[in-house]
């Protein structure tokens, strides 16, 4: 556990928590804004591997606590003990934790330590893709996390509504806050906007992927995981090929060992491009962006793709449904329905003028409602108002 917390500060102290180091990117902008606003800011996550980029934000202290993403009673008890030690050291006025394990551990330890403000930042609902006993256990843990929190902040309206529908929170005694139109962190619109280098970046991306000529590219960015709906995307691609659509599906992201890579590799129209540390250079090579997800909190990659001027095809799943305006910035299709997905993608492939129109509308949509600075400021202002 790393520690260099300043002592004797009169500023309000906040501890921001996520489970995996992969989620630290969600906290970077907010942590920096809070430092500027005069907070003493601490961040906690599972350890960052030595071969990954460190989380370095001026004025922010990073603490590392081992946290297993999957339920593991013995490991979780050790993690809870580490959280208790951390809270005694940091003495926060506010604990704000998101992602299931960090949120549960953070709310348990901060409630025991009588931290006055305990915020559960609801970033997604894992139980939506679980079944049987696992779903019941996850539901019970969600209820406990909500119960122990003093405030609940969801990243999308549909996610809040799903919590109410499942009885995980109450509109009256445990209401959920959604700021503006939601978003996990917003998007730096300028970073992803198509600029003077668009044609060069488009050519370089397509050359990296081995895509020749004007073959249209359907892009995906994200984890290679069952919950992301890549089996349906594979099936939809095969249906499109059978209908005579020449296309390529470029999948960008890290494998999570589910066997999906082997499935996708057998599709001659799928290109597994691996992980990218500069996704802003990948979107220009695409013509359509597709996120066939089964569940989300709020998919930031959709906002990135829209900021880059791409039309988006995504599902009507929780979280994803908030990320586009159906028919204006992209198309929604029924979650898990590969034939319906192929129909939506095929329509866009047949109507390039409409894809251009939707891409432009998507850029305006993101710039108006999801600019990162505005989203960050909204959360920071909300935090200032909580006593």
Image (cartoon, rainbow, N blue to C red):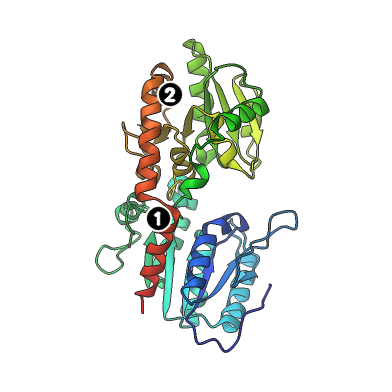
Residue 28: % across, % down? 54, 61
- Under circle 1, the secondary element is loop
Which of 286/83 is in front? Answer: 286
Residue linked to disc 1: 155
| Residue depicted at x 66% and y 25% | 207
Q: Residue at x 60, y 69 (%)?
A: 58
Instruction: Give me the residue at 42% from left, 69% from top.
Output: 119
| Residue 3 versus residue 135 in the image, above or below | below
Residue 144 visible at all = no
- Residue 100 percent location from the top left of the image: 50, 59
Question: Which quadrant is home to the N terminus?
Answer: bottom right
Near-viewer residue (169 or 17): 17
Residue count near mark 1 (Cα–Cα under 10 Å), binned few <14, some 14–19, many ≥20: many
Horizontal relation, residue 2 to residue 307: left or right = right
Q: Furthest-right residue in view?
A: 50
Q: Which residue is mark 2?
A: 345
Which is nearer the N-term, disc 2 or disc 1? Answer: 1
């Amino acid at each position: 556990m790393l520690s260099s917390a300043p002592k004797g500060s009169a500023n309000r102290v906040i501890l921001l928590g996520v489970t995996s180091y992969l989620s630290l990117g969600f906290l970077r902008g907010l942590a920096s804004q809070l430092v500027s606003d005069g907070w003493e800011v601490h961040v906690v996550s599972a350890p960052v591997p030595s071969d990954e980029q460190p989380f370095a934000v001026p004025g922010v202290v990073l603490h590392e606590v081992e946290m297993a993403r999957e339920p593991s009673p013995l490991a979780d008890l050790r993690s809870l003990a580490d959280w208790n030690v951390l809270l005694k050291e940091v003495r926060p006025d506010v604990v704000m934790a998101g992602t299931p394990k960090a949120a549960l551990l953070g709310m348990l330890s901060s409630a025991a330590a009588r931290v006055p403000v305990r915020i559960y930042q609801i970033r997604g609902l894992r139980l939506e893709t679980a079944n049987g006993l696992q779903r019941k256990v996850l539901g019970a843990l969600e209820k406990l996390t909500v119960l122990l929190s003093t405030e609940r902040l969801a990243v999308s309206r549909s996610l809040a509504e799903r919590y109410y529908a499942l009885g995980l929170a109450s509109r009256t005694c445990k209401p959920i806050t959604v700021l503006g139109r939601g978003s996990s962190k917003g998007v730096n619109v300028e970073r992803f906007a198509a600029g003077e280098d668009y044609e060069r970046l488009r050519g370089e991306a397509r050359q990296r992927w081995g895509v020749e000529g004007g073959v249209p590219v359907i892009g995906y960015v994200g984890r290679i995981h069952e919950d992301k709906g890549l089996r349906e995307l594979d099936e939809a691609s095969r249906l499109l090929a059978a209908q005579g659509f020449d296309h390529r599906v470029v999948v960008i992201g890290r494998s999570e060992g589910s066997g999906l890579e082997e499935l996708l590799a057998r599709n001659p129209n799928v290109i597994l491009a691996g992980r990218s540390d500069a996704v802003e250079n990948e979107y220009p090579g695409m013509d359509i962006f597709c996120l066939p997800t089964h569940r989300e909190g709020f998919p930031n990659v959709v906002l990135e793709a829209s900021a880059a001027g791409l039309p988006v095809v995504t599902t009507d799943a929780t979280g994803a449904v908030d990320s586009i305006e159906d028919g204006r910035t992209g198309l929604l299709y029924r979650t898990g329905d590969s034939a319906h997905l192929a129909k939506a993608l095929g329509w866009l492939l047949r109507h390039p003028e409409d894809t251009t129109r939707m891409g432009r509308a998507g850029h305006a949509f993101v710039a108006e409602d999801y600019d990162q600075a505005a989203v960050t400021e909204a959360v920071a202002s909300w935090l200032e108002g909580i006593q």
